Amino acid sequence: MGNWGWNHMGSGGGWGMGFGGGLFMILFWVVIIAAVVVLARWLFGGSSRIDLPRGKSALDILKERYARGEIGKEEFESKKRDLE
């Protein structure tokens, strides 16, 4: 009778066994997880960074935020001192 793919330890020679099998199993899951992450980022808007228009200084942006009411006078003055 044949051993039907079973080795002497009683386990089959599946993905995790054999020459480099464990390494290929880890690589397989890394590729799957990376593909899911890339797909999710693509579907849900990419990166979270804010693209600022070129040519504006930090002080210009600070002044705009103050003018829109996003920050108060104290915060504006404090940040302005930090920038100068």
Image (cartoon, rainbow, N blue to C red):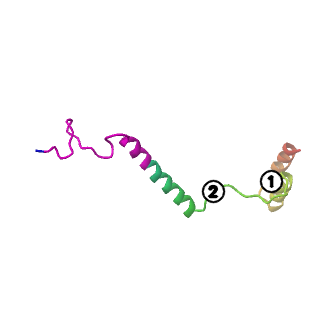
**What is the spatial separation of the Cα atoms under label 2 and label 1, in whole angstroms?**
29 Å
Task: Give the camera-side residue of 22 and 65.
Answer: 22
Q: Which mark is residue 47?
A: 2
Q: Residue furthest right?
A: 84
Which residue is painted at 20% across and 42% down in the image?
6
Q: Is residue 16 magenta?
A: yes
Place residue 54 in its image quadrant: bottom right
Kindly report the secondary structure that dominates the magenta region of the rendered protein.
loop
Q: Quadrant of the C terminus?
A: top right
Mark whose residue sits in front, 2 or 1:
2
Which residue is painted at 36% across and 43% down in the image?
21
Place residue 81 in its image quadrant: top right
Badge 1 density bin: few <14, some 14–19, many ≥20, Cα 10 Å: few
Q: Which mark is residue 57?
A: none
Q: Which residues are magenta?
A: 2-28
Q: Residue furthest bottom?
A: 43
